[in-house]
Amino acid sequence: MTTSNGQYIAAIDQGTTSSRCIVFGADGRIVAVDQQEHSQIFPQPGWVEHDAEEIWTRVQSVVSGALAKAGLTRDDIRAIGITNQRETTVLWDRNTGKPVHNALVWQDTRTEDLCKELGRNVGQDRFRRETGLPLASYFAGPKIRWLLDNVEGLRERAERGEILFGTMDTWVIWNLTGGVDGGKHVTDVTNASRTMLMNLHTLQWDEKIAESMDVPMSVLPEIRSSAEIYGEAVGELAGVPVASALGDQQAALFGQTCFDVGEAKSTYGTGTFLLLNTGEKVVNSYHGLLTTVGYRIGKEAPVYALEGSIAVTGSLVQWLRDQLGIISTAAEIETLASTVEDNGGAYIVPAFSGLFAPYWRSDARGVITGLTRYVTKGHLARAVLEATAWQTREVVDAMEKDSGVTLSALKVDGGMTSNNLLMQNIADVLDVPVERPFVAETTALGAAYAAGLAVGFWPDLDTLRANWHRAAEWTPRMDEATRDREYKNWLKAVERTMGWIEEDQTTGQ
Amino acid sequence: MAGSIQSLERAAAILRLLAGGERRLALSDVANALGLAKGTAHGILRTLQQEGFVEQDKDSGKYQLGAELLRLGQSYLDVHELRARALVWADDLARASGETVYLGVLHQRGVLIVHHVFRPDDTRQVLEVGSMQPLHSAALGKVLTAFDPVARAELMESEREAFTPHTVTGLDAIDAEAAVVRERGWAQAVEETWTGVASIAALIQDRRRNPVGAVALNGPVERVCTTEPNGTAGPVRPELVVSVREAARAISRDLGAPRF
């Protein structure tokens, strides 16, 4: 292994719409960024695919781009870290390196019927105890099965040991470390925890589940920790250790330095993902959350997390802009909401495709309720922002019920953190301070941190924690009576959404 | 200037006066601010109103910019859009300098703080978004006064309080300093609003090079200023000035302003 004196860490962030490479310095500051989008392929409604070869080309290109922008060479880079869109599934030929089909993206819903079938008489919680996940179309296992069933001759090739499976971390690492010429076929515990094939307690592939899903063990990569040297890069970064992999939301948890039990982060984008560190304990959820691996550093004990996702947050603002035309830019929602003092009695529940955590009701549809002649578009704008705040509150409440942990502060990141009114509103309804750190790129930072730890660039978690600085903090200002009244009204509004779709069978708890 | 048309110049001046955000002015305000006879101002306002460039509020009789101007693409920048575009650069400025960063826009005869980044030392700090800073004595206000004629007009109307012994309150002195600010492109305020605090600010422009706001760095005099041999505070540190100006340029570029 080459020992380098490099003073920088490169993070590859392979996301749903683009790939980026960000170079970080020792204090966690960004030195250079390069980014390229890749094609979104929609073969039919509900299906979403990516061309994995295109993604690998983009990744190589952004790595070169970021190095060039920073004026650095591979000698300056101490280690490479990977973070990635989770669950997106690709199968390829180990001898040619060619994907056998486009990658099936996490949003792709083609495995819905397969998931129902796999639930048999038990339902969507059939594998929850082992995997922490309900049977849902996001996860990788059923996607592998779909490919094996639908690509001609693939199952036979897989059984002959010619086919490899990977989520995007695995695909990038295999190619980065040599591909057909000795590429490492590995994944990390966080990505493996989104396949529905890994046992959360042993952190190994669960042979029984693989058998139930009819997925041959031979296609599966080796499960490794999130921070260790998987191998050395070839090509542009030849000799640089590839030293971390984390799913994007887990990487954000790590980048926000939520290393202690009870620390949580929430990433506000089109949707929102809230992760709570539950330490070495696997917390089963009875309130519609997912149990997942937060991270594992080398041989240390794994750290688990509870995850709650909110499907519609920033996308509700986009809906107001694009479908209703009430605002012309997303930032204007705050201007409009600031024209009024409160919601004027109006509530919006954006159950566009049903209610997610903690309800899981597919028969629900969105409502705007409490309308009177008094209500203006300003009140509706406020109701839009409040919807994100109350949905956060419901996920936090579910987490507290499942884990027994009481949140003392919420660390936030993502595009919506520039909305001051929303951040204040979240602090108000949670009744805890909301903190925004410097460095908005917490996802890439998390991957860089893990890689840096693995090679000794940073000595320990405390050093990383010392890099975290508060750029803004919103403290609760709402009085308890108002908060209780408003929460009651919100819950009443949520009730109004249920049972709208009559013919649909409700799934879930 | 040869060949210029006086009534057009006056109409332009009135529009500029009314363009300072969401504000309404009475006929007498307009006439006084521009040194026009009331009758003259009224005639121009009526013509602008017919063209849709100006609207008159039915109840108060006050004037404001009309919808036609919005259609001409002259709408003012949404402050929340400004914050969203400035976020990364303001963070970077605070981290690089180790000091507090503010973004301010002209609002009701003062500077409205639309974004605030904490000093990165994790001490208890309170978010000051929504608070006001004075036009005449804060660095943000000085920049706006120097580059924005509307701010200059509002400064005349505002009460110029002497917060400290260093506060400059005389209009002539303020105008003289504004000329310097325009010349060098940034403003400083050392203990003119708050004892012990020095600040440096630079202008943010939109794609038409209109002044839309300013970005400032605030910190203790001991850190923001150099120290003279006799131990007193000297001029502000040039490297901090560079950082503030770079941040202002980066934000302006993100708003579409041409490169300088």
Image: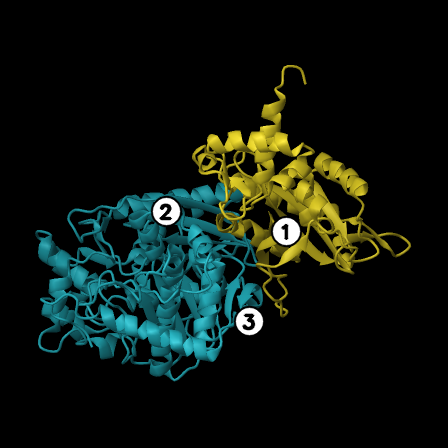
Say which mark, if any, is on residue B111.
1
Q: Is residue B102 left or right of residue B64?
A: right
Q: Is residue B26 left or right of residue A158?
A: right
Going 43% across and 76% down the picture, which residue do you hit? Answer: A483
Front position in the image: A156 or A90 = A90
Q: Which chain is yellow?
A: B
Q: Which chain is cyan?
A: A
Q: Amino acid at mark 3?
A: Asp
Which chain does the numbered disc 3 sit on?
A
The residue labelled by disc 3 is A462
Crowding around mark 2 (Cα neighbors within 10 Å: few <14, some 14 to 19, many 20+) is many
Crowding around mark 1 (Cα neighbors within 10 Å: few <14, some 14 to 19, many 20+) is many
Q: Secondary structure at mark 1?
A: strand
Q: Is residue A265 left or right of residue B15?
A: left
Q: Is residue A186 left or right of residue B211?
A: left
Q: How far apart in space, not on screen, are marks 2 and 1 (Cα)? A: 45 Å
Q: Secondary structure at mark 2?
A: helix
- Are dots 1 and 3 on a single chain? no
The residue labelled by disc 2 is A59
Q: Is residue B39 above or below residue A52?
A: above
Image coords of residue B250 (percent x, y): 56, 42
